[in-house]
Amino acid sequence: HVIIFDEIDAICKRRSANASSTRDTVQDSVTSQLLTKLDGYSQLNNILVIGTTNLRESVDPALTRPGRLEVSIKVQLPNRDDRTKIFDIYTKLLLQHHLLEQNIDIERIICDTHGLTGAHIEQLVRIAINNALRRGVMARETLDVDETSAEQIRINNSDFTNALRKARSMAHDFCK
């Protein structure tokens, strides 16, 4: 059995020496309860407990002592080859259905995604798709473009440039 606490920093924050508010007191109590429960799981067979976080420094140090979550594995951001593979996964169907303009500068996009996670790259592609869809709808409504022409609108470099700006902004907000 595997128990995964995603974003464990949200429920097991570093406890404060002087809990100044009811919220701090409740948070400290939740952390203490989780630590107590983790002390008991090692007596059970076939149980693996995993905690994930992007904010390792905000997790209570008692959580990582022996017998609890003692092994720490840092997952690095994807390198250039990894980002290329991730981008290829999320654009595969777009390429198969000829929904990307032929002049898409994939190399530039891959370079510009340095520092982003796989999830951010997925989001980048989704935003670019939405940009193209929005452009198609607007063209159909404002320019009296027929349905066939609107369906032929493809994702272009501008869609990715705008999507990258938005994805970077969201990634920055996420990592604060």
Image (tube, rainbow, N blue to C red):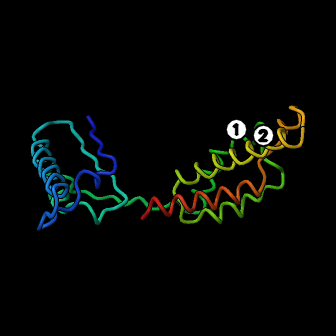
Measured Cα–Cα span from mark 2 to mark 1: 21 Å
Say if mark 2 contacts mark 1, CB within 8 Å.
Answer: no
**Location of mark 1 (residue):** 93
Dot label at residue 30: none
Viewer-nearest residue: 171 or 25: 25
**Location of mark 2 (residue):** 137
Q: Position of residue 137 (x, y in %)?
A: 78, 40
| Mark 2 or mark 1, whichever is nearer to me | 2
The C terminus lies in which quarter of the figure?
bottom left
User: What residue sits 62% from the left and 52% below the top?
Assistant: 124
Q: Position of residue 139 (x, y in %)?
A: 84, 43
Q: Position of residue 74 (x, y in %)?
A: 37, 61
The N terminus lies in which quarter of the figure?
top left
User: What residue sits 82% from the left and 42% below the top?
Assistant: 153
User: What residue sits 53% from the left and 58% below the top?
Assistant: 170
Q: Amino acid at mark 1?
A: Leu
Viewer-nearest residue: 62 or 10: 10
